[in-house]
Image (spheres, helix red, strand yellow):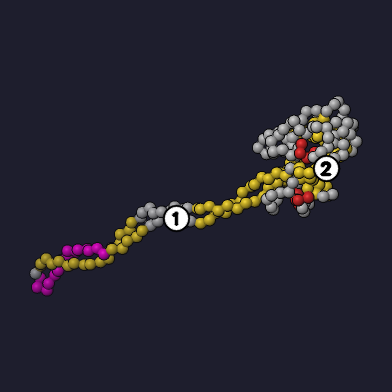
């Protein structure tokens, strides 16, 4: 028998079976720049020169000549230059898609031993090992299919991850196949042979070609297939 239980708690945990997608959001901020400026001043100064004036009578006297000129004084100071603009950045937003309805039960049952709303046993935000779903005894192509909730943030962008955990009960060999589907089209398949009786958490990241093959994120589902080896 294959048991499919909730994911453990952690920074990305949010449910037993979930898809993690990312989107983009823009934010605006203010940028301020402070720099050094120069101030120059031009002023008028007085230069006084004393020289000798000579006369034809060969008499020597003392005279004064005054010359007025323009001088420059330069001062370098530190001033604040402030520029305000808008800074637009991209924020990575995580969103989780979790099972929200049953599409096919197969022989799978929940922890209460019935097949009523299997998705409700694997959709919690915080991990709870008291609820789970499990295949029938000695399964043979025993398949359950659950629909994923729709993303709330669009467009959806990479990375795109599918995360789940699983274990078996009993001593027989059990193989598990997990498929991500869009409608009836298989996007990705992950196979786990001879699984352990210890709960194992697995995170699968879609390749870029796999991600690009999704045309409708509102039509995603997960399929679990159990087989006795």
Q: Quadrant of the N terminus?
A: top right
Residue at the spot 87% in from the left edge and 29% down from the top edge: 173
Image check: 169 left or right of 95? right
Q: CA distance from mark 1 to mark 2?
A: 60 Å
Residue at the spot 77% in from the left edge and 54% down from the top edge: 215
Residue 82 — which label? 1
Residue 215 — which label? none
- Answer whether residue 202 is visible to the viewer in this image: no
The residue positioned farthest toward the bottom in the image shown: 56
Q: Quadrant of residue 160?
A: top right
The residue positioned farthest toward the top in the image shown: 171
Span of residues in magenta:
44-58
As for residue 180 lying within the magenta part, the answer is no
**Residue placed under numbered mark 2 in the picture:** 145
Residue at the spot 17% in from the left edge and 67% down from the top edge: 65
Instruction: Pinpoint residue 220: horizontal percent, then vertical percent.
Output: 78, 48
Q: Nearer the viewer, residue 99 or 65?
A: 99
Image check: 102 left or right of 61? right
- Judge whether 133 appears above or below 40 on screen: above
Instruction: Pinpoint residue 158: horizontal percent, then vertical percent.
Output: 70, 48
Q: Quadrant of the C terminus?
A: top right
Q: Earlier in the sequence, mark 1 or mark 2?
A: 1
């Amino acid at each position: 028998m294959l048991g499919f239980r909730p994911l453990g708690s952690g920074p990305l945990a949010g449910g037993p079976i979930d898809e993690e997608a990312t989107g983009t959001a823009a934010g605006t901020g203010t940028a301020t720049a402070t720099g050094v400026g120069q101030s120059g001043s031009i002023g008028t100064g007085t230069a006084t020169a004393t020289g000798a004036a000579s006369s034809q009578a060969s008499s020597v006297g003392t005279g004064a000549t005054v010359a007025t000129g323009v001088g420059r004084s330069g001062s370098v100071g530190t001033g604040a230059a402030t520029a305000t603009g808008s800074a637009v950045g991209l924020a990575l937003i995580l969103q989780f898609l979790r099972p929200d309805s049953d599409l096919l039960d197969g022989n799978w049952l929940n922890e209460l031993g019935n097949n009523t709303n299997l998705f409700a046993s694997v959709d919690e935000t915080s991990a709870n090992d008291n609820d789970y779903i499990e295949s029938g005894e000695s399964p043979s192509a025993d398949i359950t299919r659950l629909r994923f909730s729709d993303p709330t943030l669009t467009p959806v962008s990479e990375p795109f991850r599918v995360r789940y955990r699983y274990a078996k009960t009993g001593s027989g060999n059990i193989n598990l196949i997990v498929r991500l589907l869009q409608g009836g089209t298989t996007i990705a398949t992950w196979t786990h042979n001879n699984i352990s009786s210890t709960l194992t958490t697995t995170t699968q990241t879609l390749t870029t070609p796999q991600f690009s093959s999704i045309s409708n994120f509102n039509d995603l589902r997960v399929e679990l297939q159990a087989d006795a080896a």
